[in-house]
Structures are given as structure tokens and as C-alpha cells.
Amino acid sequence: MKRVLIPDLVLDAYGARSGVGVTIEDGRIAGIGPTTEGERLPGRALAPGFVNDHSHAFQRRLRGAVEKIEPSRPHDDFWTWRERMYELADGLSPDSIRETSRRCYEEMLSAGYTRVTEFHYVHHRPDGTPYDDPNSLAKAVALAAEDAGIRLLLLPVAYARGGLPRFRDPTVQSFLHRVDDLRGWAEDRPLVGVGVAAHSVRAVPREWLEEIGDYARFGNLPLHIHADEQEREIEECLSEHGVRPIELLAQTSYLGPGTTIVHATHADEHELDLLAEHGATVCACPTTEGNLGDGFLPAVEIRDRGIGLSVGSDSHVRVDPFEELREIETNARRMEGRRNVLVAENEISPTPYLLHAGWGRAGLQAGDHADLIELNLSHPALSGVKADDLRSALVFGAGGGVVAGTRVAGERVHG
Ligand SMILES: [Zn+2]
């Protein structure tokens, strides 16, 4: 089935075009070009859907519940927050994780995310024994994405030590066997892709990093890991391995062009050089990093080295791609003491760089999945904004409320 959508404007990272139609066929964009024939979308702009590149959907249940100091723990930080999160994780069942994840994914669609990368580490029964189907919880998350209609990259996450018993697999082979199984199960599910991850260098030993790195390279799979989020994690890595987390990843086979480092908040110059050399990318999660008191992304150093950047809503303290992008730039401004900091080469505004990070691409292209958002041009946040200024108004002055409709594979899933 073929249809042509004609909004008032079509946005990409570099501009806004009018008189343009977007042709959708079999869930993909078949073409973009001047047209007058098709379904008009008055008062709307069409843009690519945002990619939420780091999510723990179940943590959505902590929203609003952890914004106070427990009298027994007067010093509240990442590590006390983590205990609250563990309590929540300990109580999850296949049904409850599916329900919570579906609600979280629906919120993402309403805010303009069309794809999510789920970093999934709750695998087994609370006592650590596997479910009858050892991938029950991972499949529950995938079914939640299908229920909501969001595109999913599911990352089963390896955990060897620390955390809760239900996070851990006894051997890296048994973990990878589960990943094999999940990949087979997901093969004929059009919205679900499978990659692989290790939780962090504190959660797995060096040999696991080697095995998982090799497995990802051999299968050409996306490979993620949390690194350099907290100073303490770096100190522990230095005392165990004598090197910093990203240095350890570079010594193993973990670092490569398919690798995404989540956070990299405290990455030093050498670690950032290693990311650039290996073609690895960084996923920043500014609203969560701010909420947890992690620190600031070294955004200027990342931009200067040409390291690819994506964003994620991580703990879902907030689900709003516009806010994630805005925080990256405004934090960089605070740190640099000047304006318009993350400006790409040959540009005069940070907007194209930021939108590219949020969309994972510069704009809509023939052949891409028809994962689109409709923006309400008469929303109060956008009223009076000229077409040429619209992209920057979105990044600097709007929120997910301007998203009037969301399509995944051409199907309307919100609005
Ligand atoms: Zn995370």
C-alpha cells in the first residue's frame, strides 16, 4: 500500500521545506519530493522520529518516588538511588515488566521517540534460577514494545558479579547461549532487533569482555556498555586492572565501530582518543545524569574528535528527546561560559549537530523505515516561530508536547 503525506513543512537537520510530500510504501519511505497529490496534514511539520538509545524501561516506576532523602541515608547519591532501583528490580515478574515497559514505551512514542534501545539486565527469578524459558523477561520487554508499536533494539546484558542474583549468569557461554536463542526468536518480528551488552567493567571480568566483544563482531551486532558514569567505578577499575574502563575495553576486543559507550561522563583525554581511534560512539543521558548527580558530558571533546553521539532517557526520570538535546548544549554552555558551543564544521548553530544526535541521521531519506513524527505548528511553544527558526525552536524552546502524531513503519502509533 502506498500513501503520500503532505505536511506544511518537512524538517531535516539543515532546514525546513514546504510543498514536499513524503511517500510511504511497505513501512518505508519510498520518496520525498515536490507534490500536490496526497493526504494533506495542515498545521503540521513532519520530521524523523527520535532514537532513544539507552533505556531501562522498568525504572519508569521510580518516577517521583525517589526525589527525597531517606532519613536513614542522609547522604543520597547514585549508590543510594541504586538500592531503591534494586528493590524495584527484585519485585518484577514477566507480567509486571511487560506492563511497566509498555507504559514507558507509550510515553516515548507520545514524546517523539520511534525507536528504543533497551539495556535489559533483569533475566532470572529473584533467587537467580532461570525461568522455564530463560528469556521470559527479555521476551516480555519485546512484547511490550510490540504492544506499544515502538521499534526496539533489545540488548540482553551480561552480569557476572555484583547486583542482584537475578541479573547474573553463571558463565559467559550460558549468557551467549541465551542471546542466540533470543536472536532466533526475534528473527520474524519486524519491530524487534537484538544486539548484546555487558553491564559495565565492574559487573563482568576481562574474559567476558573478550568473549562478548568477539561474539558481537562475529555476528555484526550492536554492542553497548555503561562506562565512566561514576568516579568510584573508575577507581575500582584502576585498582583491579591498572587501567581506566575505556582503556580496559580497548585492551580487550570490546571496542570497535559497533560499540556504544553509555555515559562516558568522566572519560579522560586518552579514553576519548581511544573511542575516536576505534570508531566507537557515545550515548549521553543528560536528564538521568543530572538527576543522579553523575556529572557533565565532555561534549566539546567528543565533538572535536568526531565521536558519534546519541541520546537516551535511561532511568526515565524524564522522557523527552528535546530536553535531552537541550541539556547537552546548555550544560556545555555552562561549562564553557559562552553560547552556541556544539557547532559542527561549516555550521553557525548547534541545532544540526544536536538533531543529528537525536535522530541518528540528518533527515528523512528514501529507503529508511517510515518512522516519523508530526509536529503541531500551532502549539503555544511554536507559535510565531518562522519556518527557518523552527528546528532551533524545537531544540531550545519546546518539549514532547509539540508532538501531535507518531508513526512507526508508516503506522500511526500515537496521536
Ligand atoms: Zn543505564
Image: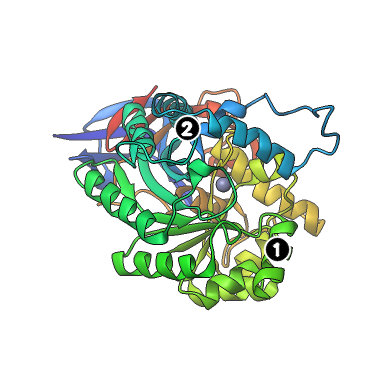
* Quadrant including the C terminus: top left
Image location of residue 402, percent across then percent down: 52, 28
Classify 10 Å Cα crowding around label 1: few (below 14), some (14-19), many (20 and above). some
Q: Quadrant of residue 309?
A: bottom right
Q: Which mark is residue 311?
A: none
Q: Name the residue under label 2.
A: 108
Q: What residue type is labelled 2?
A: Met
Classify 10 Å Cα crowding around label 2: few (below 14), some (14-19), many (20 and above). many
The residue nearer to you, when weighing 106 against 126, is: 126
Viewer can see residue 244: yes
Apparent side of residue 76 relative to residue 401 in the rendered image (left or right): right
Q: Quadrant of residue 348?
A: bottom right
Q: Quadrant of residue 219?
A: bottom left
Q: Name the residue under label 1.
A: 236
Lower sequence index among marks 1 and 2: 2
* Quadrant including the N terminus: top left
Q: Residue at x 68, y 57 (%)?
A: 265
Q: Is mark 2 on a helix, strand or loop?
A: helix
Q: What element carries label 1?
A: helix
Instruction: Decide: is 329 above or below 139.
Output: below
Q: What residue type is labelled 1?
A: Glu
